[in-house]
Image (tube, helix red, strand yellow):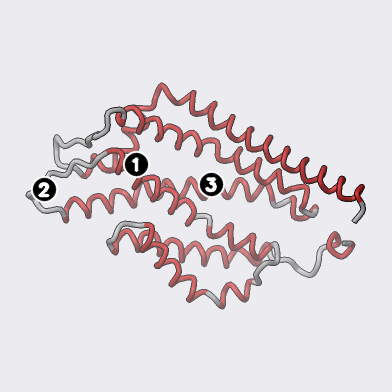
Amino acid sequence: MSDQAQSENYQHFISHLIELRNRLMRCAIAVVIVFLALMPFASTIFDLLAAPMMHTLPAGAKMIATGVITPFLIPVKVTLMVAFLISLPWVLYQLWAFVAPGLYAHEKKLIAPLVISSSALFVAGVAFCYFFVFRVVFKFVNDFAPKSISVSPDIESYLDFVMTMFVAFGVTFEVPVIVIVLVRMGFVSLAKLKEIRPYVIVAAFVVAAIVTPPDITSQCLLAVPMCLLYEIGLLIAPWFEKIGVSPEREDA
């Protein structure tokens, strides 16, 4: 390879890094702007997040904070998480826009539907976890606790648990999108995905056992939707399955 070709490749690589930096900065700026707008309501946002736990605690019981600055720091973290969720469509768009130049024309048409569906499904997973899973799991834990124990969860531990569950269910609800992308991009055939269905079911329960509390209720509440969403992805994937080779790829 000549020195000129090497120089061109280097400049091309640097231009990609600059574009990636710019798009990441746009994502960060969007999250920061939403975060600053939500900061005056940080305490209210945390109260909403703690509502599923508070509804299951005995009358008069409250959560506790063991750190000196924890009562301030935890609501700020929660507000940042909410700001990221609100900014998620813009963040996903920036990521897809970065890879768009490397896609063919028929592949670029999938960007908008994937951004919208990915954002909607992630939020749906978080909402399912908040409105249904938390109430079931917290009620089960508090009913199981011995009467001699005063249940007063620490807000820092509570936040760690909530964020883990939100991410787990948000990613779980992305399963149909993952299936469609794998089929549409030709990485895996639809027949192969149907063939490995038993292994996917086993993997779903293994993942649920790792990321959820050690009780069968919460594990099933994660594994069963994961399996159902996989089946939904298999049902929808044929609409996106490639028929033959695209003209762009034939020309390439």
Question: Which residue position holds label 2?
Answer: 149
Q: Which badge, 3 or 2, comes first in the chain's sequence?
A: 3
Q: Indicate the position of residue 122 as horizontal and vertical percent values.
A: 50, 48
Q: Is residue 198 above or below residue 135?
A: below
Quarter of the figure with residue 22: top right
Q: Which badge, 1 or 3, comes first in the chain's sequence?
A: 3
Q: Which badge, 1 or 2, comes first in the chain's sequence?
A: 2
Tell me whether the residue at label 1 lies in contact with that at label 3, contact meaning CB atoms closer than 8 angstroms: no
User: What amino acid is found at the position of numbered circle 2 in the picture?
Assistant: Ile
Q: Is residue 175 shown left or right of residue 77?
A: right
Q: What's the distance in space between the residues labelled 1 and 3, CA to CA?
A: 23 Å
Disc 3, SS: helix
Q: Indicate the position of residue 44 as horizontal and vertical percent values.
A: 34, 28
Q: Is residue 199 above or below residue 236?
A: below
Figure quadrant of the N terminus: bottom right
From the image, state whether disc 3 or disc 2 is nearer to you.
2
Figure quadrant of the C terminus: bottom right
Q: Residue at 27% of width from left, 32% of height from top? A: 67
User: What amino acid is found at the position of numbered circle 3 in the picture?
Assistant: Ala
Q: Which mark is residue 137?
A: none
Q: Residues within 10 Å of mark 3 (few under 14, many from 20)?
A: some
Question: Which residue position holds label 3?
Answer: 120
Question: Which residue position holds label 1?
Answer: 159
Quarter of the figure with residue 180: bottom right
Q: Residue at 54% of width from left, 26% of height from top? A: 33
Q: Residue at 51% of width from left, 36% of height from top? A: 86
Disc 1, SS: helix
Furthest residue in direction left, as rendered = 148
Viewer-side residue, 48 vs 76: 76
From the image, state whether disc 1 or disc 3 is nearer to you.
1
Disc 2, SS: loop
